[in-house]
Amino acid sequence: MALLETHGLTKSFGALTAVNAVTLRVEAGAVHSVIGPNGAGKTTLFNLLTGAFPPSSGQLFFDGKDITGTPSHRVAHLGLARSFQRTNVFPALSLLDNVWIAAFARNVSRRGLTWRRAQHYPETTERARSALADVGLAEKANHLAREISHGEQRQLELAIALAAAPRVLLLDEPAAGLSPDETRKMVALVRALRGRYTVVLIEHKMDIIMNVSDRISVMHFGSLIAEGTPAEIQRNPDVRRAYLGGAAA
Ligand SMILES: Nc1ncnc2c1ncn2[C@@H]1O[C@H](COP(=O)(O)OP(=O)(O)OP(=O)(O)O)[C@@H](O)[C@H]1O
Ligand SMILES: [Mg+2]
């Protein structure tokens, strides 16, 4: 069954249709990638999926429920977590504190906060530590976020998203700006998440996409032009023409 599904999802900014009638099914447990040239509408599609803004038209379903127009804080509580195209951490806090905040935010009840010391939330601390371990940063839990490398900051960002115990993880270019070595590490991390999480991944680096994806959707000028397995996408002539261009031909 599709965990996340869109029907004719459309977003216009004035005369520009950034996302044009996108119909997409993301199966539970899959790594589903969205690729396409710069400006194809990938990040805008993520913004629609997370409720950052409502679509101009079309519908969004999560776990069979129509959640079209649900604002982002409520979508997050339903279990969609995203990491951003740009790194987004608190540099003056430790890695554990950065992740702990995300784990704690997940638990805040509708009745609001009760102020207790952090050690009175052992299960939150446990979830934060296990998210750090999942991304290979357990040993640096007490380092400040500003002290770690750029690659590790991206791993930390992934841990922050994981700490919210999401059902769907949306990753927008998690390997942006990483060295080849750091990129390899990130690929291994995303592969390790497969099956445990449902992952929607935006990425420009083709080797990553072909390595980790169960399915790939290709966007071009706001529209989906192809969908399939990595092998199918690699030999799709429309994709080669529109996206891979000379590099793949
Ligand atoms: N808030 C906005 N207001 C106006 N136009 C926008 C807005 N957000 C995005 N756009 C436009 O929508 C189009 C799609 O942008 P988007 O950021 O979704 O592309 P993308 O596929 O993520 O590109 P990239 O690979 O460079 O990250 C672009 O032409 C962009 O300028
Ligand atoms: Mg983008």
Image (tube, rainbow, N blue to C red):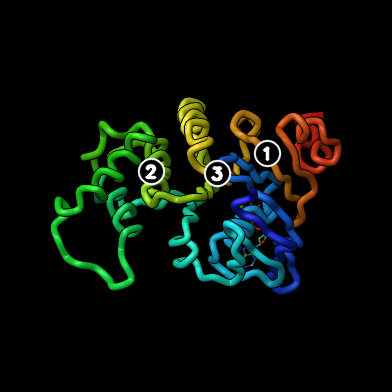
Point out the tag, 1 or 3, that comes first from the N-terminus: 3
Q: Residue at x 53, y 66 (%)?
A: 52
The label on residue 159 is 2
The label on residue 168 is none
Category of crowding for the residue at label 3, using alpha-carbon neighbours closer than 10 angstroms: few (below 14), some (14–19), many (at least 20): many
Question: Which amino acid, by three-letter code, is at mark 2?
Answer: Ala
Q: Which residue is mark 1?
A: 215
Q: Secondary structure at mark 2?
A: helix
Q: Is mark 3 within 8 Å of ligand 2?
A: no
Q: CA distance from mark 2 to mark 1?
A: 24 Å
Foreground residue, 27 or 161? Answer: 27
Q: Quadrant of ligand 1?
A: bottom right
Q: Position of residue 24 (x, y in %)?
A: 70, 53
Q: Mark 1 near mark 3, Cβ–Cβ under 8 Å?
A: no
Q: Which residue is mark 3?
A: 199
Point out the tag, 2 or 3, that comes first from the N-terminus: 2
Q: Mark 2 near mark 1, Cβ–Cβ under 8 Å?
A: no
Q: Position of residue 136 (x, y in %)?
A: 36, 31
- Could you say which quadrant of the image residue 73 lies in? bottom left
Q: Residue at x 68, y 56 (%)?
A: 41
Category of crowding for the residue at label 1, using alpha-carbon neighbours closer than 10 angstroms: few (below 14), some (14–19), many (at least 20): many
- Could you say which quadrant of the image residue 146 lies in? top left
Point out the tag, 2 or 1, that comes first from the N-terminus: 2
Question: Which amino acid, by three-letter code, is at mark 3?
Answer: Val
Q: Position of residue 170 (x, y in %)?
A: 53, 49
Question: Which amino acid, by three-letter code, is at mark 1?
Answer: Arg
Work out whether 63 lies above or below 151. below
